[in-house]
Image (cartoon, rainbow, N blue to C red):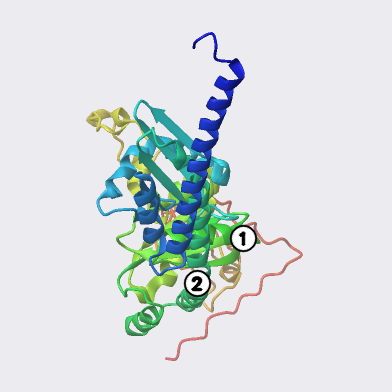
Amino acid sequence: MPDGVPFIAVTKAVFAWRAREERRQLEWALHTQRALTAAAVQPGGLAGILGAYERATGRAALVVDLLERPIASSRPGHETLAAEFTEMLARVRAQGLLGAAVDAAPGRRREVHPLGSRRLRAWLLVTGPADRAGSNLVTGDLVSLLSLELERVHGLGTTRQRDRAQVLARLARGTVDDIVAARWLDAAGLPDGGLRAAVVAAPHADELAADLAGALPDALTRVVEVAGEPCVELAVPVGVDLAAVLGTLAPARPAGIGIEVRPGALAVSLRQARSALPESRLTGRHVHAADIANSRRLLATVPGEQLQATPTPCSARSTRATGPPTWCAPSPRSWSTTATGRRPPPRCRSTATRCATASRRWSSSPGAGWHRPTTARTCGSHCAPATSPARPTADVPLRVTPPAPAHP
């Protein structure tokens, strides 16, 4: 600057220029806020708000649900942008409403913002040029308007979720005819195809049920108590990857998953899901009911080299049992004697039936006393080893009814 120009004149010109620039940005932000508000009160919904934002700022915007599926975008074709934010979403997922991320690369800026008032409902993904400094002034307004719209949609769906919970309660009582079940599902606005049930234990079951209902529009959800613990019962169509959904929305909660059933037999899948819940608590992962009694799960616990067949020499084989003989456990009814003075065959301990393979006869003829034969056969694996019954003492007299005389 020339020596004759005072310093105060330079600073005055600079601050005047900055004031005009700030005023211009504030006026632009005010007009943009009005445009966003006008779009929010019109029937356009989320897509209308995002479209107004892109027209004003030149940045693409996308709203994804908790499963990272696109809900609305500022322009058709932006749905593929969700794949670029996978890593950023993984970083902020566990922080809920308090998690946000910004990636400022040369010439490009990406942002992730949570949406929701008291509960995380979705995420806002924004990408565009980095030289639009004024765009940051309206980002907060965009997040507020989108959160209000999501809460409004969630409030409208509360009555629908209540009706679906009643349908799930009817189907959980027992098996019904498929025609009746299809009529109930159609009344709730759901398809009448195959269903799969799941039970998730959660301390805040109401919030988890709301998340599941928002992420799965064709699901039946309700909150119940299983063994005194609040749980969420869930039924979804067969085409839904239920394991992936629970792994995202309830990764650290015990959950049991039932099998695929027809709509009228949903109670069967729910019972199987409840039976798998204790196993999930022990293993710390989500358990399918079909895997509990599956032979493949048992084989998976044994190393592969031990499952290979090993030939056994003929000399090492034995055709006779080397262990001591075992006796069938007699039942209380086997102490009574018949008219011929012989005890009836003992009963098997596990099946409570007459043991046909055991030979134990007790003679009660006068002068012979009680004796046991020297050989006996057991009923196999049903009876456990048991000691022979004690002989009656002198204090307990034995009464034997003599056989009736034969007529000549």
Q: Amino acid at mark 2?
A: Leu
Asked which secondary structure carries label 2, the reply is helix
Q: Is residue 323 visible?
A: no
Q: Is residue 282 above or below residue 38?
A: above
Q: Position of residue 100 (x, y in %)?
A: 51, 39
Asked which secondary structure carries label 1, the reply is strand
Quadrant, the C terminus: bottom left
Question: Foreground: 382 or 279?
Answer: 279
Residue bearing the label numbered 2: 156
Question: Foreground: 226 or 24?
Answer: 24
Splitting the image into 4 quarters, where does residue 105 fall? top left
Q: Is residue 229 above or below residue 22?
A: below
> How many C-alpha atoms fall within 10 Å of the one at disc 2: few (<14), some, or many (≥20)?
few
- Nearer the N terminus, badge 1 or badge 2? 2
Question: Foreground: 282 or 345?
Answer: 282
Residue at (23, 28) in percent of width and height? 313
Q: Amino acid at mark 1?
A: Pro
Residue bearing the label numbered 1: 230
Question: Mark 1, mark 2: which one is toward the viewer?
Answer: 2
Q: Is residue 137 visible?
A: yes
Q: Position of residue 167 (x, y in %)?
A: 46, 77
Question: Foreground: 114 or 397?
Answer: 114
Q: Position of residue 281 (x, y in %)?
A: 55, 47
